[in-house]
Image (cartoon, rainbow, N blue to C red):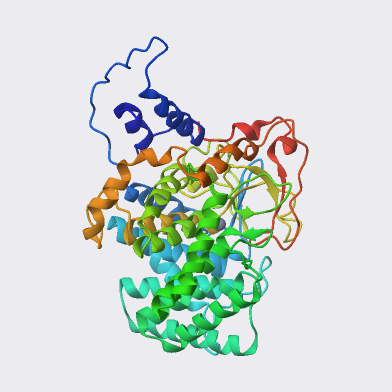
Protein backbone atom coordinates (compact mmCIF):
# COMPACT_ATOMS: atom_id res chain seq x y z
CA UNK A 1 0.00 0.00 0.00
CA UNK A 2 1.49 3.29 -1.00
CA UNK A 3 1.75 6.22 1.32
CA UNK A 4 -0.81 8.32 -0.50
CA UNK A 5 -3.47 5.67 -0.89
CA UNK A 6 -2.97 4.49 2.64
CA UNK A 7 -3.47 7.99 3.88
CA UNK A 8 -6.68 8.33 1.89
CA UNK A 9 -7.99 4.99 3.05
CA UNK A 10 -7.14 5.51 6.70
CA UNK A 11 -8.23 9.09 7.06
CA UNK A 12 -11.02 9.62 9.53
CA UNK A 13 -12.31 12.40 7.32
CA UNK A 14 -12.27 10.28 4.21
CA UNK A 15 -15.59 10.72 2.38
CA UNK A 16 -15.19 7.50 0.41
CA UNK A 17 -17.80 4.76 0.45
CA UNK A 18 -17.19 1.18 1.50
CA UNK A 19 -17.09 0.40 -2.20
CA UNK A 20 -14.54 3.05 -2.87
CA UNK A 21 -12.55 1.99 0.17
CA UNK A 22 -12.41 -1.55 -1.07
CA UNK A 23 -11.51 -0.37 -4.54
CA UNK A 24 -8.71 1.65 -3.00
CA UNK A 25 -7.60 -1.38 -1.07
CA UNK A 26 -7.50 -3.48 -4.21
CA UNK A 27 -5.72 -0.72 -6.03
CA UNK A 28 -3.11 -0.57 -3.34
CA UNK A 29 -2.38 -4.30 -3.58
CA UNK A 30 -1.36 -3.68 -7.17
CA UNK A 31 0.28 -0.36 -6.53
CA UNK A 32 3.67 -1.78 -5.73
CA UNK A 33 3.83 -4.07 -8.77
CA UNK A 34 5.80 -3.30 -11.93
CA UNK A 35 3.78 -1.93 -14.87
CA UNK A 36 3.27 -3.75 -18.18
CA UNK A 37 6.75 -2.72 -19.32
CA UNK A 38 8.39 -4.03 -16.19
CA UNK A 39 9.19 -0.57 -14.86
CA UNK A 40 8.81 0.03 -11.14
CA UNK A 41 6.08 2.48 -10.16
CA UNK A 42 7.20 6.06 -9.62
CA UNK A 43 7.81 7.16 -6.07
CA UNK A 44 5.06 9.33 -4.67
CA UNK A 45 5.75 12.40 -2.68
CA UNK A 46 5.76 11.60 1.00
CA UNK A 47 2.92 13.16 2.95
CA UNK A 48 2.35 12.79 6.65
CA UNK A 49 -0.68 10.56 7.25
CA UNK A 50 -3.65 11.95 9.08
CA UNK A 51 -4.26 10.13 12.31
CA UNK A 52 -6.84 7.40 12.37
CA UNK A 53 -8.35 8.07 15.78
CA UNK A 54 -11.24 6.03 17.09
CA UNK A 55 -12.23 8.99 19.24
CA UNK A 56 -13.18 10.86 16.07
CA UNK A 57 -16.01 8.43 15.45
CA UNK A 58 -17.13 8.43 19.07
CA UNK A 59 -17.35 12.22 18.94
CA UNK A 60 -19.29 12.16 15.67
CA UNK A 61 -21.96 10.01 17.31
CA UNK A 62 -22.72 12.77 19.83
CA UNK A 63 -24.89 14.56 17.29
CA UNK A 64 -27.05 11.47 16.88
CA UNK A 65 -27.15 10.66 20.59
CA UNK A 66 -28.14 14.19 21.58
CA UNK A 67 -30.60 15.03 18.83
CA UNK A 68 -32.42 11.86 17.79
CA UNK A 69 -34.69 11.97 20.83
CA UNK A 70 -38.14 13.32 21.58
CA UNK A 71 -38.88 16.30 23.82
CA UNK A 72 -38.53 14.05 26.88
CA UNK A 73 -35.17 12.66 25.80
CA UNK A 74 -36.49 9.25 24.74
CA UNK A 75 -34.67 7.89 21.66
CA UNK A 76 -36.41 6.45 18.61
CA UNK A 77 -35.78 2.83 17.65
CA UNK A 78 -37.10 3.16 14.08
CA UNK A 79 -36.18 5.48 11.28
CA UNK A 80 -38.21 4.77 8.17
CA UNK A 81 -37.21 5.56 4.61
CA UNK A 82 -40.58 7.08 3.86
CA UNK A 83 -41.47 10.31 2.11
CA UNK A 84 -40.80 12.25 4.25
CA UNK A 85 -38.54 10.15 6.45
CA UNK A 86 -39.89 9.54 9.91
CA UNK A 87 -38.50 8.53 13.27
CA UNK A 88 -40.89 6.35 15.23
CA UNK A 89 -41.02 5.18 18.80
CA UNK A 90 -41.29 1.44 19.32
CA UNK A 91 -41.06 -1.00 22.22
CA UNK A 92 -37.22 -1.27 22.16
CA UNK A 93 -36.98 2.45 23.00
CA UNK A 94 -37.16 1.83 26.74
CA UNK A 95 -34.92 -1.03 27.86
CA UNK A 96 -32.90 -1.57 24.71
CA UNK A 97 -32.06 1.65 22.85
CA UNK A 98 -32.20 3.74 26.02
CA UNK A 99 -29.83 1.48 27.95
CA UNK A 100 -27.42 0.98 25.05
CA UNK A 101 -27.24 4.73 24.54
CA UNK A 102 -26.70 5.47 28.23
CA UNK A 103 -23.76 3.09 28.06
CA UNK A 104 -22.55 4.74 24.83
CA UNK A 105 -22.74 8.20 26.39
CA UNK A 106 -20.52 7.04 29.26
CA UNK A 107 -18.10 5.31 26.92
CA UNK A 108 -18.01 8.26 24.53
CA UNK A 109 -17.24 10.58 27.44
CA UNK A 110 -14.45 8.31 28.58
CA UNK A 111 -12.99 8.35 25.10
CA UNK A 112 -13.29 12.05 24.35
CA UNK A 113 -13.59 13.82 27.69
CA UNK A 114 -16.83 15.43 26.50
CA UNK A 115 -19.97 14.94 28.58
CA UNK A 116 -23.40 14.96 26.97
CA UNK A 117 -26.25 16.51 28.98
CA UNK A 118 -28.52 13.74 27.70
CA UNK A 119 -26.50 11.20 29.71
CA UNK A 120 -28.03 12.40 33.00
CA UNK A 121 -31.52 12.31 31.43
CA UNK A 122 -31.05 8.73 30.31
CA UNK A 123 -29.65 7.67 33.67
CA UNK A 124 -32.74 9.05 35.43
CA UNK A 125 -35.01 7.36 32.92
CA UNK A 126 -33.32 3.97 33.18
CA UNK A 127 -33.27 3.95 36.97
CA UNK A 128 -36.86 5.22 37.00
CA UNK A 129 -38.00 2.24 34.94
CA UNK A 130 -36.64 -0.29 37.45
CA UNK A 131 -39.41 -1.80 39.55
CA UNK A 132 -38.64 -1.52 43.27
CA UNK A 133 -40.23 -4.87 44.01
CA UNK A 134 -38.56 -7.03 41.35
CA UNK A 135 -35.44 -4.99 40.67
CA UNK A 136 -36.06 -5.51 36.94
CA UNK A 137 -36.55 -2.89 34.26
CA UNK A 138 -40.19 -2.88 33.19
CA UNK A 139 -41.22 -1.29 29.92
CA UNK A 140 -44.19 1.02 30.52
CA UNK A 141 -47.44 0.53 28.62
CA UNK A 142 -47.88 2.96 25.74
CA UNK A 143 -49.75 2.87 22.46
CA UNK A 144 -46.68 1.22 20.90
CA UNK A 145 -45.38 -0.81 23.82
CA UNK A 146 -46.72 -3.49 26.10
CA UNK A 147 -45.68 -3.55 29.74
CA UNK A 148 -43.17 -6.34 30.31
CA UNK A 149 -39.80 -7.12 31.85
CA UNK A 150 -37.95 -8.49 28.82
CA UNK A 151 -34.80 -10.55 29.53
CA UNK A 152 -32.86 -8.78 26.79
CA UNK A 153 -33.70 -5.44 28.40
CA UNK A 154 -32.36 -6.66 31.74
CA UNK A 155 -29.11 -7.77 30.14
CA UNK A 156 -28.54 -4.48 28.35
CA UNK A 157 -29.58 -2.38 31.33
CA UNK A 158 -27.45 -4.23 33.86
CA UNK A 159 -24.40 -3.83 31.62
CA UNK A 160 -25.11 -0.12 31.18
CA UNK A 161 -25.55 0.44 34.92
CA UNK A 162 -22.31 -1.36 35.73
CA UNK A 163 -20.52 0.68 33.06
CA UNK A 164 -21.81 3.88 34.67
CA UNK A 165 -20.81 2.60 38.11
CA UNK A 166 -17.29 1.74 37.03
CA UNK A 167 -17.02 5.24 35.58
CA UNK A 168 -18.34 6.95 38.69
CA UNK A 169 -19.39 4.78 41.65
CA UNK A 170 -22.33 5.99 43.71
CA UNK A 171 -24.90 4.44 45.99
CA UNK A 172 -27.88 4.94 43.68
CA UNK A 173 -26.21 2.99 40.92
CA UNK A 174 -24.93 0.34 43.27
CA UNK A 175 -28.38 -0.15 44.72
CA UNK A 176 -29.95 -0.45 41.27
CA UNK A 177 -27.31 -2.95 40.15
CA UNK A 178 -27.62 -5.11 43.23
CA UNK A 179 -31.42 -5.08 42.99
CA UNK A 180 -31.36 -6.03 39.34
CA UNK A 181 -28.84 -8.82 39.86
CA UNK A 182 -31.00 -10.14 42.66
CA UNK A 183 -34.06 -9.88 40.45
CA UNK A 184 -32.32 -11.87 37.72
CA UNK A 185 -31.32 -14.59 40.17
CA UNK A 186 -34.90 -14.83 41.41
CA UNK A 187 -36.22 -14.85 37.85
CA UNK A 188 -33.84 -17.64 36.83
CA UNK A 189 -35.15 -19.78 39.68
CA UNK A 190 -38.63 -19.46 38.20
CA UNK A 191 -37.90 -19.79 34.49
CA UNK A 192 -35.00 -20.29 32.08
CA UNK A 193 -34.75 -18.05 29.06
CA UNK A 194 -34.48 -19.87 25.76
CA UNK A 195 -32.50 -19.09 22.61
CA UNK A 196 -29.82 -16.46 22.59
CA UNK A 197 -31.60 -14.59 25.35
CA UNK A 198 -30.47 -17.46 27.57
CA UNK A 199 -26.90 -16.33 27.04
CA UNK A 200 -27.38 -12.64 26.32
CA UNK A 201 -27.02 -11.61 29.95
CA UNK A 202 -23.87 -13.59 30.83
CA UNK A 203 -21.52 -10.72 30.05
CA UNK A 204 -23.68 -8.32 32.08
CA UNK A 205 -23.67 -10.67 35.05
CA UNK A 206 -19.91 -11.07 34.81
CA UNK A 207 -19.45 -7.30 34.71
CA UNK A 208 -21.56 -7.11 37.86
CA UNK A 209 -19.70 -10.00 39.49
CA UNK A 210 -16.28 -8.54 38.79
CA UNK A 211 -17.15 -4.96 39.71
CA UNK A 212 -19.16 -5.54 42.87
CA UNK A 213 -17.76 -8.96 43.80
CA UNK A 214 -21.34 -10.17 43.47
CA UNK A 215 -21.10 -13.91 44.02
CA UNK A 216 -24.70 -14.68 43.09
CA UNK A 217 -24.22 -12.93 39.75
CA UNK A 218 -21.15 -15.04 38.95
CA UNK A 219 -22.99 -18.21 39.92
CA UNK A 220 -25.91 -17.32 37.69
CA UNK A 221 -23.51 -16.54 34.86
CA UNK A 222 -21.92 -19.96 35.30
CA UNK A 223 -25.29 -21.67 35.33
CA UNK A 224 -26.31 -19.87 32.14
CA UNK A 225 -23.03 -20.79 30.44
CA UNK A 226 -23.50 -24.45 31.31
CA UNK A 227 -27.08 -24.47 30.12
CA UNK A 228 -26.36 -22.72 26.82
CA UNK A 229 -23.56 -25.11 25.94
CA UNK A 230 -25.32 -28.21 27.26
CA UNK A 231 -28.62 -27.56 25.52
CA UNK A 232 -26.97 -26.97 22.16
CA UNK A 233 -29.67 -24.60 21.00
CA UNK A 234 -27.19 -21.97 19.87
CA UNK A 235 -23.98 -23.88 19.20
CA UNK A 236 -23.53 -27.26 17.56
CA UNK A 237 -21.26 -29.94 19.06
CA UNK A 238 -18.76 -29.29 16.27
CA UNK A 239 -18.50 -25.64 17.38
CA UNK A 240 -20.58 -24.02 14.68
CA UNK A 241 -23.81 -22.04 14.93
CA UNK A 242 -27.13 -23.72 14.52
CA UNK A 243 -28.82 -22.79 11.27
CA UNK A 244 -29.95 -19.20 11.33
CA UNK A 245 -27.58 -18.29 14.14
CA UNK A 246 -28.10 -14.68 15.15
CA UNK A 247 -24.61 -13.23 15.22
CA UNK A 248 -25.21 -10.40 17.70
CA UNK A 249 -26.99 -12.63 20.19
CA UNK A 250 -24.61 -15.57 19.82
CA UNK A 251 -21.50 -13.43 19.95
CA UNK A 252 -22.72 -11.59 23.03
CA UNK A 253 -23.20 -15.00 24.61
CA UNK A 254 -19.63 -15.93 23.66
CA UNK A 255 -18.23 -12.64 24.98
CA UNK A 256 -19.86 -13.51 28.31
CA UNK A 257 -18.70 -17.13 28.16
CA UNK A 258 -15.11 -16.04 27.50
CA UNK A 259 -15.29 -13.70 30.47
CA UNK A 260 -16.66 -16.47 32.67
CA UNK A 261 -14.03 -18.97 31.48
CA UNK A 262 -11.28 -16.53 32.42
CA UNK A 263 -12.95 -15.77 35.75
CA UNK A 264 -13.48 -19.43 36.64
CA UNK A 265 -10.23 -20.68 35.13
CA UNK A 266 -11.96 -23.06 32.72
CA UNK A 267 -9.61 -23.84 29.79
CA UNK A 268 -12.05 -26.26 28.15
CA UNK A 269 -14.77 -23.63 27.94
CA UNK A 270 -12.27 -21.01 26.79
CA UNK A 271 -11.04 -23.32 24.01
CA UNK A 272 -14.58 -23.92 22.88
CA UNK A 273 -15.27 -20.20 22.77
CA UNK A 274 -12.13 -19.76 20.71
CA UNK A 275 -13.21 -22.50 18.31
CA UNK A 276 -16.58 -20.79 17.88
CA UNK A 277 -14.87 -17.47 17.30
CA UNK A 278 -12.78 -19.05 14.54
CA UNK A 279 -15.96 -20.43 13.02
CA UNK A 280 -17.55 -16.97 12.94
CA UNK A 281 -14.32 -15.59 11.53
CA UNK A 282 -14.51 -18.17 8.72
CA UNK A 283 -18.00 -16.89 7.89
CA UNK A 284 -16.76 -13.31 7.66
CA UNK A 285 -14.98 -11.94 4.64
CA UNK A 286 -11.28 -11.36 4.89
CA UNK A 287 -11.78 -7.60 4.54
CA UNK A 288 -13.88 -7.54 7.70
CA UNK A 289 -17.51 -7.92 6.68
CA UNK A 290 -19.58 -9.97 9.09
CA UNK A 291 -23.11 -11.30 8.42
CA UNK A 292 -26.03 -10.53 10.71
CA UNK A 293 -27.33 -14.09 10.58
CA UNK A 294 -25.26 -17.13 9.67
CA UNK A 295 -26.87 -19.81 7.58
CA UNK A 296 -30.11 -18.06 6.70
CA UNK A 297 -30.99 -19.37 3.26
CA UNK A 298 -32.11 -17.22 0.37
CA UNK A 299 -31.13 -14.03 2.10
CA UNK A 300 -29.35 -10.92 1.04
CA UNK A 301 -26.40 -10.83 3.36
CA UNK A 302 -26.45 -7.82 5.63
CA UNK A 303 -25.30 -7.06 9.12
CA UNK A 304 -26.11 -4.78 12.03
CA UNK A 305 -23.60 -2.71 13.94
CA UNK A 306 -24.55 -4.59 17.11
CA UNK A 307 -22.93 -7.70 15.62
CA UNK A 308 -19.75 -5.79 14.86
CA UNK A 309 -19.66 -4.63 18.48
CA UNK A 310 -19.68 -8.16 19.85
CA UNK A 311 -17.32 -9.50 17.19
CA UNK A 312 -14.81 -6.84 18.20
CA UNK A 313 -15.51 -7.53 21.88
CA UNK A 314 -14.83 -11.24 21.50
CA UNK A 315 -11.77 -10.79 19.28
CA UNK A 316 -10.24 -8.26 21.67
CA UNK A 317 -10.93 -10.51 24.67
CA UNK A 318 -9.27 -13.48 22.99
CA UNK A 319 -6.41 -11.35 21.65
CA UNK A 320 -5.68 -10.06 25.13
CA UNK A 321 -5.69 -13.59 26.54
CA UNK A 322 -3.57 -15.86 24.45
CA UNK A 323 -4.51 -15.09 20.85
CA UNK A 324 -2.66 -11.98 19.66
CA UNK A 325 -3.15 -13.22 16.11
CA UNK A 326 -6.70 -11.82 16.26
CA UNK A 327 -5.56 -8.20 16.38
CA UNK A 328 -5.52 -8.34 12.60
CA UNK A 329 -9.19 -9.31 12.62
CA UNK A 330 -9.96 -6.34 14.84
CA UNK A 331 -8.15 -4.02 12.49
CA UNK A 332 -10.00 -5.27 9.45
CA UNK A 333 -13.48 -5.13 10.90
CA UNK A 334 -12.93 -1.71 12.47
CA UNK A 335 -11.37 -0.10 9.43
CA UNK A 336 -13.41 -1.72 6.72
CA UNK A 337 -16.80 -2.21 8.26
CA UNK A 338 -17.34 -0.39 11.55
CA UNK A 339 -16.03 2.95 10.33
CA UNK A 340 -18.09 2.64 7.16
CA UNK A 341 -21.20 1.84 9.19
CA UNK A 342 -21.35 5.30 10.74
CA UNK A 343 -23.90 7.55 9.06
CA UNK A 344 -22.58 10.68 7.40
CA UNK A 345 -24.30 11.74 4.18
CA UNK A 346 -27.99 11.02 4.63
CA UNK A 347 -29.28 13.30 1.91
CA UNK A 348 -31.35 10.38 0.63
CA UNK A 349 -33.60 10.83 3.67
CA UNK A 350 -35.93 13.79 3.13
CA UNK A 351 -37.27 15.52 6.20
CA UNK A 352 -40.37 17.65 6.68
CA UNK A 353 -39.66 20.54 9.05
CA UNK A 354 -43.26 21.72 8.80
CA UNK A 355 -44.75 18.69 10.54
CA UNK A 356 -44.75 18.90 14.33
CA UNK A 357 -43.78 15.85 16.37
CA UNK A 358 -46.52 13.59 17.63
CA UNK A 359 -46.36 11.28 20.59
CA UNK A 360 -44.82 8.53 18.45
CA UNK A 361 -43.39 10.16 15.32
CA UNK A 362 -40.98 12.88 14.27
CA UNK A 363 -40.29 14.15 10.74
CA UNK A 364 -38.08 17.17 11.36
CA UNK A 365 -34.40 17.08 10.37
CA UNK A 366 -34.33 13.31 10.38
CA UNK A 367 -31.24 13.14 8.18
CA UNK A 368 -29.32 15.73 10.21
CA UNK A 369 -30.27 14.17 13.52
CA UNK A 370 -29.22 10.70 12.38
CA UNK A 371 -25.74 11.84 11.34
CA UNK A 372 -23.24 10.03 13.52
CA UNK A 373 -25.62 7.12 14.13
CA UNK A 374 -24.91 3.62 12.88
CA UNK A 375 -26.30 1.46 10.13
CA UNK A 376 -28.74 -1.27 10.96
CA UNK A 377 -28.19 -3.34 7.82
CA UNK A 378 -25.02 -2.81 5.84
CA UNK A 379 -23.88 -5.02 3.00
CA UNK A 380 -20.25 -5.15 1.87
CA UNK A 381 -20.82 -2.19 -0.41
CA UNK A 382 -24.12 -0.59 0.63
CA UNK A 383 -25.05 1.41 3.65
CA UNK A 384 -28.52 -0.11 3.49
CA UNK A 385 -28.47 -3.67 2.19
CA UNK A 386 -32.15 -4.38 1.73
CA UNK A 387 -35.65 -3.03 1.95
CA UNK A 388 -37.11 -4.44 5.12
CA UNK A 389 -40.33 -3.84 6.98
CA UNK A 390 -41.31 -4.52 10.55
CA UNK A 391 -43.25 -7.66 11.34
CA UNK A 392 -44.58 -6.29 14.60
CA UNK A 393 -46.55 -3.23 15.61
CA UNK A 394 -49.77 -1.80 14.30
CA UNK A 395 -50.63 -0.26 10.95
CA UNK A 396 -48.79 2.92 11.90
CA UNK A 397 -45.50 1.00 11.67
CA UNK A 398 -46.13 -1.63 9.03
CA UNK A 399 -45.22 -1.56 5.36
CA UNK A 400 -42.50 1.07 5.71
CA UNK A 401 -38.91 0.53 4.62
CA UNK A 402 -36.61 0.66 7.60
CA UNK A 403 -33.59 2.91 7.15
CA UNK A 404 -32.20 2.41 10.66
CA UNK A 405 -32.77 0.22 13.69
CA UNK A 406 -31.29 2.22 16.49
CA UNK A 407 -30.27 -0.64 18.71
CA UNK A 408 -27.16 -0.06 16.63
CA UNK A 409 -27.02 3.63 17.61
CA UNK A 410 -25.31 2.95 20.92
CA UNK A 411 -23.56 -0.20 19.77
CA UNK A 412 -21.29 1.66 17.36
CA UNK A 413 -19.73 3.69 20.16
CA UNK A 414 -19.53 0.56 22.30
CA UNK A 415 -17.60 -1.16 19.51
CA UNK A 416 -15.12 1.70 19.24
CA UNK A 417 -14.76 1.83 23.00
CA UNK A 418 -14.14 -1.90 23.19
CA UNK A 419 -11.52 -1.60 20.49
CA UNK A 420 -9.88 1.40 22.04
CA UNK A 421 -10.11 0.76 25.73
CA UNK A 422 -9.59 -2.95 25.97
CA UNK A 423 -6.89 -3.29 23.43
CA UNK A 424 -6.06 -1.91 20.06
CA UNK A 425 -4.91 1.68 20.20
CA UNK A 426 -4.05 3.09 16.81
CA UNK A 427 -3.51 6.59 18.10
CA UNK A 428 -1.38 5.10 20.85
CA UNK A 429 -1.97 7.79 23.42
CA UNK A 430 -4.06 7.07 26.46
CA UNK A 431 -4.80 3.37 26.49
CA UNK A 432 -4.91 2.14 30.08
CA UNK A 433 -3.00 -0.89 28.86
CA UNK A 434 -0.29 1.17 27.33
CA UNK A 435 2.23 -1.60 27.69
CA UNK A 436 0.73 -3.19 24.63
CA UNK A 437 0.53 -0.08 22.56
CA UNK A 438 3.61 -0.69 20.49
CA UNK A 439 2.40 -4.07 19.39
CA UNK A 440 -0.95 -2.63 18.45
CA UNK A 441 0.63 0.11 16.48
CA UNK A 442 2.64 -2.53 14.71
CA UNK A 443 -0.64 -4.28 14.02
CA UNK A 444 -1.90 -1.09 12.47
CA UNK A 445 0.85 -1.22 9.92
CA UNK A 446 0.51 -4.88 9.03
CA UNK A 447 -1.92 -4.35 6.21
CA UNK A 448 -0.26 -7.27 4.46
CA UNK A 449 -2.54 -9.37 6.64
CA UNK A 450 -5.33 -8.27 4.39
CA UNK A 451 -3.80 -10.30 1.59
CA UNK A 452 -5.50 -13.67 0.98
CA UNK A 453 -2.95 -15.56 3.01
CA UNK A 454 -5.15 -17.88 5.03
CA UNK A 455 -7.39 -20.68 3.90
CA UNK A 456 -10.40 -19.25 5.71
CA UNK A 457 -9.74 -15.87 4.21
CA UNK A 458 -9.38 -17.25 0.74
CA UNK A 459 -12.63 -19.14 0.92
CA UNK A 460 -14.44 -16.12 2.29
CA UNK A 461 -12.98 -14.04 -0.49
CA UNK A 462 -14.17 -16.45 -3.13
CA UNK A 463 -17.71 -16.05 -1.84
CA UNK A 464 -17.71 -12.29 -2.03
CA UNK A 465 -19.59 -11.89 -5.31
CA UNK A 466 -22.54 -13.80 -3.93
CA UNK A 467 -22.79 -11.38 -1.03
CA UNK A 468 -23.65 -8.48 -3.24
CA UNK A 469 -27.27 -8.15 -4.37
CA UNK A 470 -27.59 -8.18 -8.11
CA UNK A 471 -30.31 -6.45 -10.12
CA UNK A 472 -31.31 -9.67 -11.85
CA UNK A 473 -32.00 -11.68 -8.70
CA UNK A 474 -35.53 -12.53 -7.75
CA UNK A 475 -37.23 -11.62 -4.53
CA UNK A 476 -35.94 -13.41 -1.46
CA UNK A 477 -38.01 -13.43 1.67
CA UNK A 478 -36.53 -13.71 5.09
CA UNK A 479 -38.12 -16.08 7.53
CA UNK A 480 -40.74 -14.24 9.50
CA UNK A 481 -39.94 -15.73 12.85
CA UNK A 482 -37.25 -17.43 14.78
CA UNK A 483 -34.47 -15.65 13.00
CA UNK A 484 -33.18 -13.59 15.80
CA UNK A 485 -33.32 -10.22 17.37
CA UNK A 486 -34.94 -8.16 14.68
CA UNK A 487 -36.71 -10.99 12.92
CA UNK A 488 -37.65 -8.55 10.20
CA UNK A 489 -38.93 -9.52 6.82
CA UNK A 490 -36.84 -8.37 3.97
CA UNK A 491 -36.53 -8.42 0.24
CA UNK A 492 -33.43 -8.26 -1.82
CA UNK A 493 -32.74 -4.71 -2.74
CA UNK A 494 -32.76 -5.30 -6.42
CA UNK A 495 -36.06 -7.08 -6.30
CA UNK A 496 -37.62 -4.53 -3.98
CA UNK A 497 -36.50 -1.61 -5.98
CA UNK A 498 -38.78 0.29 -8.05
CA UNK A 499 -36.05 2.36 -9.58
CA UNK A 500 -33.09 0.55 -8.13
CA UNK A 501 -32.43 3.80 -6.37
CA UNK A 502 -31.59 1.85 -3.25
CA UNK A 503 -28.56 0.48 -5.01
CA UNK A 504 -27.19 3.96 -5.02
CA UNK A 505 -27.81 4.58 -1.37
CA UNK A 506 -24.27 3.70 -0.33
CA UNK A 507 -21.97 6.47 0.64
CA UNK A 508 -21.06 8.87 -2.14
ZN1 LIG B 1 -28.48 -3.36 16.19
Q: Residue at x 48, y 29 (%)?
A: 23
Q: Residue at x 76, y 56 (%)?
A: 395
* Residue 233 spot, x, y in % from top left: 66, 70
Q: Which quadrant of the structure image shows residue 484? A: bottom right
Q: Using the image as rendered, state which of residue 167 and residue 323 is in the foreground.
A: 323
The answer to whether 293 appears left or right of 9 in the picture is right
Instruction: Establish if 239 lies above or below 387.
Output: below
* Residue 335 spot, x, y in % from top left: 41, 43
The answer to whether 40 appears left or right of 456 in the picture is left
The answer to whether 374 appears left or right of 150 in the picture is left
Q: Residue at x 27, y 46 (%)?
A: 442
Q: Using the image as rendered, state which of residue 190 and residue 443 is in the foreground.
A: 443
Q: Using the image as rendered, state which of residue 336 and residue 179 is in the foreground.
A: 336
- The tally of labels here is 0
Q: Which quadrant of the structure image shows residue 472? A: top right
* Residue 238 spot, x, y in % from top left: 61, 64
**On-image quarter of the N terminus:** top left
Query: Which residue is situated farthest in the top direction here?
Result: 37
Amino acid sequence: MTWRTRQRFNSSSCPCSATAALALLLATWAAGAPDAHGSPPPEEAAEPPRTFALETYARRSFNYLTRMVDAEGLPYFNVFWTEPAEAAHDWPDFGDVLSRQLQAAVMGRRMTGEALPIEAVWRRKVIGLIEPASGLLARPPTSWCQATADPGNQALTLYALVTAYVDSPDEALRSAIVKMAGGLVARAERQADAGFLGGFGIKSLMACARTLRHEAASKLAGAQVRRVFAEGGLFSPDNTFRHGGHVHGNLRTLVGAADYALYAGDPVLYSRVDALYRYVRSEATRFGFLPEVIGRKGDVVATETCALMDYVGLAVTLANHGHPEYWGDVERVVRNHLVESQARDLSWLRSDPSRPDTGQFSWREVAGRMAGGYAGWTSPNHFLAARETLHWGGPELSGKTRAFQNCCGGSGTHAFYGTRWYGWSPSGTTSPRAGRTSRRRKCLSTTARMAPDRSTSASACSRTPTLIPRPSTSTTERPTSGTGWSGARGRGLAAADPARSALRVGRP
